[in-house]
Amino acid sequence: MRLACAAVAFAVAVPSLASANPIEIGAGIGKTQSSSDAESNQGTLDALNLYGRISLFGPIGLQAEIGKVDTGSQSTVRTASLLGVIELTQGRFVPVLLAGAGVDQSDDTFGTLKYAHAEVGLGLAFRISDGLTIGVDAREGTRKAIDNPDYAQPLANGGGVIDLYAPRSISEGEYRTVRATVGVRF
């Protein structure tokens, strides 16, 4: 009986919460590429993420993201970001500004590499009735290594440096990301 009452309360409450829309949760899929990868004609990397957004003061909100970048090699890249979001208009089509920072971690057979990143971007969300949101955004950022080991080793005779193999991963410097999202506002 309690379960039935909870289900009825949920069914009644969700539409009213969706009209207020203070919270959004969703998932995104996209592509990312660092400037160094673009200069060396390497392709883009696939990226997946989950996000949660909460409206704080009218059009101003806060968004938390966790994600994974597919490097196509033996490394695993995970990301976490916290962004400020400003909705530029209200309605069904909502342009947004995004700015924030976060951390990235790349794990491979050689060890763990850690980075800090900061990014800004523009997006456009299409808000369908009943709280469903479909969106796209493009971001540009910069990434800086945090206490990472050097994969290059000096030669014993002082004759130079030999670079050791390392799987493809994210790198320091500028990067660009585009993604499509699907979310639910409630």
Image (cartoon, rainbow, N blue to C red):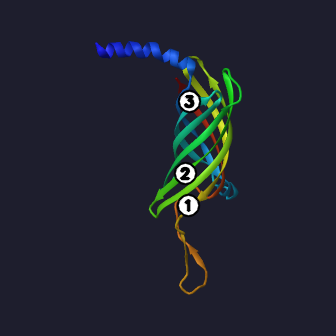
Split into 4 quadrants, where in the image is the N terminus? top left
Answer yes or no: is residue 103 visible: yes
Kindly check if marks 1 and 2 are in contact, taking CB atoms under 8 A apart as contact: yes
Which picture quadrant has residue 87? top right
Q: Residue at x 54, y 29 (%)?
A: 24
Which picture quadrant has residue 21? top right
Answer yes or no: is residue 169 visible: no
Q: Earlier in the sequence, mark 2 or mark 3?
A: 2
Which picture quadrant has residue 89? top right
User: From the viewer's perspective, is residue 128 above or below residue 49?
Assistant: above
Numbered disc in front, either 1 or 3 = 1
**Amino acid type, mark 2:** Val
Name the residue carrying label 3: 182
Q: Residue furthest bottom?
A: 157
Q: Residue at x 59, y 31 (%)?
A: 56
Residue 103 at x, y = what percent?
Answer: 54, 51
Name the residue carrying label 1: 146
Name the residue carrying label 2: 103
Q: Nearer the viewer, residue 38 or 103?
A: 103
Question: How far apart in space, not on screen, are marks 2 and 3 (Cα)?
Answer: 23 Å
Instruction: Identify the secondary structure beneath mark 2.
Output: strand
Instruction: Identify the secondary structure beneath mark 1.
Output: loop
Q: Would you call the spot at circle 1 few (<14 residues within 10 Å), some (14-19), or many (20 or more)? A: some
